[in-house]
Amino acid sequence: MKKILCGCMAGVLLLCSGCGAAYSGDRQGMPMQSVDTAMGTIVSQTIYSKTENNKITSDIHGIIRDLETNTLSVRLDTSELYEVNEGIGQQKEVMLSEELAEYLEQCLAVSEASEGAFDITVGEVVRLWNIDNWAGAEALNDYVLPDEEAIYKGLEQSGYEKLQLDEKCLSASVEMQLDLGAVGKGIALDRLKEYLEGCEEVSGAVISVGGSVLTYGVKADGAPWRVAVVNPVDTSKSLGYLELQGQWCISTSGDYERFVEINGVRYHHIIDPDTGYPADSGLRSVTILSRDGLLSDALSTACFILGQEKGQELAEAYDAEAMFVNQDGTVAMTEGMRRCVHLYD
Ligand code: AMP
Ligand code: MG
C-alpha cells in the first residue's frame, strides 16, 4: 500500500528581527509590518520608515507579483518566460527583453561554474515530477511518480550547453523548457533592493520571500539584523541565526521545503540534472550569504546538488558564504559564515 506524506515549508528562514509590535502611531523605532503571499510562498516584510507610508508595503507586494506575472512564471501565459518556453519548445529563435537576457546570462554562468548541477533547462524534468504542485496538497493519493523512460526523455530535452544566448537572442538545439524557480525569489530580492534604494524615507528593512531574505539599511536602534536558519530535522525550530549589518541576501535550499514522501522515501523539488531524480548529495540544506539575490538563490540550489565539498568550492569562487546541514545533522560552513552565525546548542 502506498503511504503518502507531503510537505510545503514556505518560510524557510524565519525572521527574528526583534520587532514584534505592529505600527502604533509613534514612528520612533516602530516598523511597519506586513505578511502576504506571492510566488507560491509567504512574503513578510518589516520596514523602518521615517513616515507611516502604507504605499511602501503595497509597492513591495506589487513588485514581487509583477515579476511573477509578467516575467518569471512558467504557468501564467502572461509572463515572458511562458512565451519563451512556447518558442524554444518548438526550437524557434526567441528575442528576449534586456532584463530576462541578463538573468539568463547569469544563470548560464552559474551552470558552467557548477558543471551543470545548476541548470535552468531542466524544466521538462521538473514538470514531470511536479513536486511544487503536490507539496502541501491535501488529496495526495493520486500522486504518481514519473516513470524512468519519461525522465530519460526529459533529460534528453535539457542541458544548458544546448541553449544559445547571443545578446538578446535565445535558441536551443533541442525542444526544451526553462524553469527559473531556483532564482525567482533571489531576483525578487534584487528588485526590492533597487526599489528601497530609491525610497528616501526608508532607513532599514528586512523582507523574506519564502527561503530568501533581504536585509537592508539599519534598524531604528542600530542593532544588527537577525535571520534565523530553519532546522531541517525539525522545521518548527531553528538551528541558530545569522547576525548581519546592512544589505545582504540570504537564501536557503532544503529537502524539507517542498516534497512528497511515498513509503518512507522523500522526493523533494531539487533535481540532479545528472540523474533526473531529486538530488541526493548527503545534505539536508544549504544557506548562502551574498550581496546579490540572484546569486544567493542560484548558489543555494547548486550547492545543495553538489554536496558540501564541491559546494563550498563553488560558493568561495563567487565570494559567497555558505552553511551546510548534513544528513547526519552535523553543520559545516565557510570562515566568513562562521563569523556571523550563532548556533543553538
Ligand atoms: P530552490 O528552492 O531555490 O533550491 O529552487 C528549487 C526550484 O528550482 C525547483 O522547484 C525547480 O523549479 C527548480 N530546479 C530544480 N532543480 C534544478 C536544477 N538542478 N537547476 C536549476 N533549477 C532547478
Ligand atoms: Mg535557489
Image: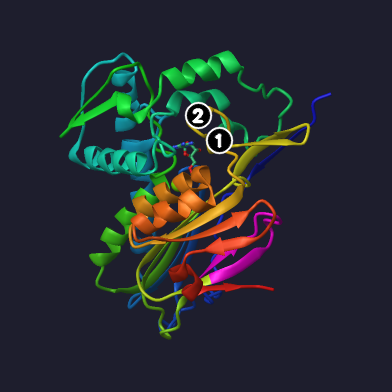
Q: Position of residue 43 (x, y in %)?
A: 48, 54
Q: Is mark 1 within 8 Å of ligand 1?
A: yes
The one of 187 and 272 positioned closer to us in this rendering: 272
Q: Is residue 236 left or right of residue 257?
A: right
Q: Which mark is residue 126?
A: 2
Pointer 2 with pointer 1, Cβ within 8 A? yes
Q: Is residue 284 left or right of residue 153?
A: right
- Disc 2 from disc 1: Cα separation: 9 Å
Q: Position of residue 300 (x, y in %)?
A: 46, 50
The one of 334 and 21 positioned closer to us in this rendering: 334
User: Sequence-wise, which precedes: disc 2 or disc 1?
Assistant: 2
Please name the residue shown 60% across and 49% down the image: 283
Any magenta on residue 312?
no
In the rendered image, is residue 39 in sight?
A: yes
> Depth-wise, is mark 2 or mark 1 nearer the camera?
2
Give the residue pinned by disc 1: 132
Q: Is mark 2 within 8 Å of ligand 1?
A: yes
- Crowding at dot 2, Cα within 10 Å, few <14 / some 14-19 / many 20+, comes out as many
Please name the residue shown 61% across and 17% down the image: 147
In this picture, is 336 found above or below 208? below
Amino acid, disc 1:
Asp
In this picture, is 271 found above or below 309? above
Q: Position of residue 293 (x, y in %)?
A: 36, 55
Q: Quadrant of residue 15?
A: bottom right
Amino acid, disc 2:
Val
Any magenta on residue 231?
yes
Please name the residue shown 53% across and 38% down the image: 270
Q: Is residue 256 left or right of residue 203?
A: right
Q: Quadrant of residue 277?
A: top right
Span shown in magenta? 226-241
